Image: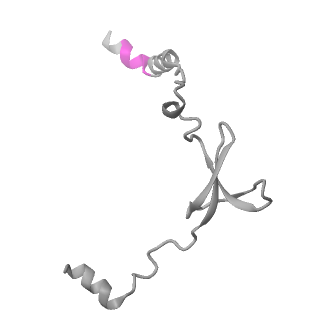
Amino acid sequence: MQPFKRSIEKSGKMKKDIHPTNYRLVVFKDMSNDYTFITRSTANTKDNIVLEDGKEYPLVKLEISNKSHPFFTGKMKLVDTAGRVDKFKNKYKKHFDKKA
């Protein structure tokens, strides 16, 4: 028998004040497409939402979920890389001019 296992068996108790206590139903909402799902969580929230069942739940706002992520949807978003390159060149123009 392992030493750790024996100590738990002897005491029969878990350590106090190390586990989250605020474990409740929380709504997660993808702000890009209004997809919501409810699950149990200990996440801290500032907002609340009332669902179709008439109950009020804590709300966690998400930027992306499986309903909007390109990997799951198969739709890739185009990124303006040309604009980023121009912005970089303008920012460091003095540095490039010295080397040329």
- Which image quarter is the C terminus in? top left
Identify the colour scheme used: one colour
Q: Is residue 96 above or below residue 41?
A: above
Residue range (magenta): 92-97
Residue 33: image location, x then y, percent: 67, 37
Residue 60: image location, x then y, percent: 63, 53
At x 30%, y 90%, the residue is 10
Q: Is residue 2 above or below residue 33?
A: below
Q: Is residue 12 above or below residue 56?
A: below
Residue 86: image location, x then y, percent: 49, 16
Pick whichever, 93 or 39, lies toward us.
39
Marks counted in the figure total 0
- Secondary structure mostly seen in magenta is helix
The quadrant where residue 44 appears: bottom right
Q: Magenta span has 81?
A: no
- Which image quarter is the N terminus in? bottom left
At x 38%, y 12%, the residue is 97
Q: Is residue 92 above or below residue 55?
A: above
At x 53%, y 35%, the residue is 69
Residue 40: image location, x then y, percent: 58, 62
The quadrant where residue 89 appears: top left
At x 52%, y 22%, the residue is 79
Question: In this rendering, would 56 be left or right of 69?
Answer: right
